[in-house]
Amino acid sequence: MKQTKTFLFLFLGLFLQSSLQATTYYGTPSDYTSYLSLLQPGDSLLLQAGDYYDRLNLDDIVGTESQPIVISGPLSGNAAVFYGNACCNTVSIERCAYLKIQNLLLDGQDIPYIDAVKAEGTAGNWAHHITLENLLIINHGGAPLTVGISTKCPAWGWIIRRNTLIEPGVGLYLGNSDGTAPFVDGLIEYNLVLNPQRYCMQVKHQNTGTRDVAGMPTEAHTTIRYNVFAKDENSDPDTPRPNLLVGNFPESGAGSNDYYEIYGNLLFQNPSEGLFQGTGNFGFYDNLLINYYSNGWGILSFPHNDFAPRTINYFNNTVYTASYGIEIYNPDLAYQQNVVGNAIFAPIPFQLNSNVNEQNNISDEDYAIVNYVQNPFGPLNQTDFRPLPNALTGTPIDPSAFSFYERYNYDFEGRSRGWEYRGAYTESNQLIWQTALEIRPEVALLTTGLWPESYARKLFSFEIFPNPTSQDKLSLSANIPSSGSLSLSLCDSYGRCLLRKEKKVKRGLFEEQIQLNDIFSGIYVLHWVFTNKRGQTASGNQKIILEKN
């Protein structure tokens, strides 16, 4: 009898173990929706490459901390592409937890007011411990308020990592505009947000009494690190916004002691606004901020949403602007604001409230930066903001006031910090962030080409018709991804160019006719070169067959 019971317990144990094993489902564009309701903790849905025209609607998909649910496209090769449509957001999240969404291309087709990823804000919704990783988000800029990644419900424990967002209306918009949907305890790292119309990223303010959602931490902090937030063009002139804005926490009660930790980011260019604006409690350090535009400033803290800045620590940043460097006014005087160890190059380096502790900074005019750093001008892949020998040094700073922060003792490139140095960099013999992609993977997209290879052809593919042709004209159309110039050359098989054209072009559909009246039958090559405002180029060739009678 004892042996029978032992066998029974062994059988039940094996049965329970097998029943708890994770399942991997393989989805295609025609059947992937049928698997969503089946997903249990630990399960994965692997989506094959292809075109997905139904949205990814994720309701009540809940994993666990040890067994998250994963929805993933291919890690390499052709992508699983989800196309937006006017009915709804491309990826919709409601009441989901411990869910990873990764390796997808989200193409909004420039339809206005549909977001690429949205945690929906209808009553009773929440979304926590969501990981968004390796998403490529394009054509979600049909209107200034079209968002790449958005949360409109209470959200906490999110990881937003290694995503690329090209020319959205807004890049990341976390929290609701009225302060009723807190975004808490997030990690935002290694993302590239390039040329949005408004914010690259904003974390909204939180009203008092909004942190009483079951499971939401009552004390937490959000880390924003190693991102590239760039606004070199495409900015909405009617409603300018800074690259990065972080709002305040509840004035009292749960969440009032939360803070932001913001370090190691590159904030690059803004033609009509500033690079960073912050209220709340935060440490902002080891960041590199570059703004060549005369109307673009560097760093600003002032009362926002009727909430004065509280504990603020701006330390060890390098700021280059053609306007002002760091401005703080009307902070809450019950708290300390520190501006320490920065390197500021601007016509107006500081505009600070008299109570702000400003010390051990180095500042000078913007044009004088050449006396302090290696190479501040030129294309981004050629600039070098490391200090010249002994140029950005002073009395060593006591870092104990900043030891609360995770990476306070490291510089912009991750080296152990020398506290005699001012600005984001410690002096070194090697520039890491341009070469080590694991440190700055996004910069490769800004510096080595116009767009990631996975969708360059889709964004910039010429259509020539008819081809072959017997007519005296050729029609050409192209999708132009950003404003710039386009040159066209029609050359024969000997390399002699018979026609040349150069035009200023804007983002959108480009159409042109090429007259062939004086050109004989034969095989020709149409060569095109597109150059954007930053001087980056893309080029290609198209064979033309002319068959005149």
Image (cartoon, rainbow, N blue to C red):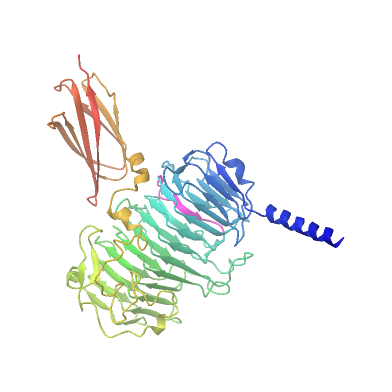
Q: Nearer the viewer, residue 346 or 90?
A: 90
Answer with the quarter of the image where residue 360 lies.
bottom left
Residue 252, given in percent of the width and then of the height, sits at 55, 74
- Residue 195 seen in the figure: yes
Residue 516, given in percent of the width and then of the height, sits at 18, 24
Q: Nearer the viewer, residue 387 or 277?
A: 387
Is 83 situated above or below 5? above
Asked if residue 141 lies in the magenta stretch, the reply is yes
Which portion, as a residue range, is magenta?
139-153
Q: Quadrant of the N terminus?
A: bottom right
Answer with the quarter of the image where residue 459 lies.
top left
Is 504 situated above or below 168? above
Residue 4, given in percent of the width and then of the height, sits at 84, 58
The furthest residue to the top: 549
Residue 251, given in percent of the width and then of the height, sits at 52, 73
Q: Quadrant of the C terminus?
A: top left
Tell whether 7 sits left or right of 372.
Answer: right
Q: Nearer the viewer, residue 210 or 396?
A: 396
Give the residue at x 74% y 58%: 13
Q: Nearer the viewer, residue 27 or 260?
A: 27
Asked if residue 466 lies in the magenta stretch, the reply is no
Is 395 situated above or below 503? below
